[in-house]
Amino acid sequence: MTKKIGVLALQGAVTEHLQALTKLGVTASAVKLPADLDGLDGLIIPGGESTAIGRLIREQHFEEPLRQLYASGKAIFGTCAGLILCSTDSDHVPEELRLGFIDIEVERNGFGRQVDSFEALLPFEGIAEPVEAVFIRAPYIRSVGKEVRVLASIDGKIVAAENDQILVTAFHPELTEDLSVLEYFLKKIG
């Protein structure tokens, strides 16, 4: 049976995720309304602007449906801004931007401004070859809770982590031809 993955389509790199998922043979759909979460096997919360996405989650009444999706055990992948939104970090992330799905503390814009964006080949735990990673105004993970596994770091900064249900990356795997991180996410679904 084909997996059905939604991409939260409020703002950010939605089209790029949908195209990458389609290349992997997955049924991909843009999640524009809370009802679009029904029947999904997993969800991607894409990169974009975390303040804008967080505001739209509240305005479009997504907060409770997203929490229900999480409570149902569905896999969720947060990239860049999605990483920030999935965090539990109460010290560095305002409450209105925090869903609390993975026990991490984050540094927003941790690698600097837009002009400081960069690409790197990154060793990634659980993937044989280094992955292509695009960092755009990227956050990094300051620390992880005991149930969280670190998957990748660069310059001593954690840029990918997971727990049993949630995967987060500080970079944009959807902006490269390397689909290995998305394939890794799909394995979380089974």
Image (cartoon, helix red, strand yellow):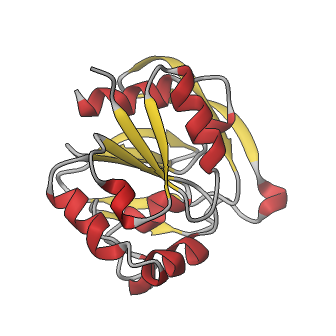
Left or right, 1 with respect to 146, comes to right
Camera-nearest residue between 46 and 150: 46
Asked whether the viewer can see residue 173, the reply is no
Instruction: Relative to 96, say whether 152 is above or below.
Output: above
Query: Quadrant location of residue 151?
Result: top left
Report the residue at 68% width, 37% height from top: 175
Left or right, 73 with respect to 115, comes to left
In the rendered image, the quadrant that contains the C terminus is: top left
Camera-nearest residue between 142 and 51: 51
Residue 78 percent across, percent down from the top left: 44, 52
Residue 29 percent across, percent down from the top left: 48, 43
Left or right, 70 with respect to 54, comes to left
Asked whether the viewer can see residue 98, the reply is yes
Report the residue at 65% width, 44% height from top: 15
Report the residue at 32% width, 43% height from top: 42
Residue 85 percent across, percent down from the top left: 43, 67
